[in-house]
Amino acid sequence: MILSVKPLKSSHLSIMYVLVPILAVLVAWATGYWEHTENGILEYGFPLAWKTSQIIPTCASCPLPVSYNWLFFLLDVVFYIAIGYACVFLYTKVIKKQKGQLTDPGKTT
């Protein structure tokens, strides 16, 4: 059985390098809906809480005051960008390794 691995073209990699930051922003924004409460304050965002709302006990139907920490949001985006680029790097390394083994079947590394 002959395995064939399609090499990644440079255009596919450049698309990935553009897609990773876009996806990172979307994931960081989506974590803004992940709620956890601490000392009467609702915090949103993972791993850093970049959106906070304070619970007002006297008014149940009042809109909650919301504040945003844009530095923490940016750090969340950088966190997800690092994860995305690590995945792309590992994927290309595995593909290159498989391609090298297909070219030279006796090669182990």
Image (cartoon, grey):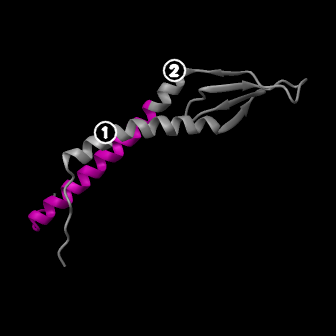
Q: Is residue 83 magenta?
A: yes
Judged left or right of residue 71, residue 11 is: left
Which percent across, then down, holds residue 30?
Answer: 57, 39
User: Which residue does the numbered mark 1 point to in the structure image?
Assistant: 17
> Within the magenta stretch, is there residue 79?
yes
> Along the polypeptide, which appears first: circle 1 or circle 2?
1
Image location of residue 29, percent across then percent down = 55, 35
Disc 1/disc 2 C-alpha distance (Å): 23 Å
Q: What amino acid type should be assigned to the residue bearing mark 2?
A: Leu
Position of residue 53 relative to residue 104, above or below, is above
Q: Nearer the viewer, residue 105 or 51?
A: 51
Q: Amino acid at mark 1?
A: Tyr
Secondary structure of residue under mark 1: helix
Above or below 98: residue 61: above
15 in relation to 74, above or below: below
Instruction: Look at the image and tell me in which quarter the N terminus lies.
Output: bottom left
| First to last magenta residue range | 78-107
Q: Quadrant of residue 68?
A: top right
Determine whether, in the image, residue 33 is placed left or right of residue 59: left
Q: Nearer the viewer, residue 37 or 106?
A: 37
**Residue at the disc numbered 2:** 71
Q: Is residue 89 above or below residue 60?
A: below
Q: Residue at x 64, y 38 (%)?
A: 33
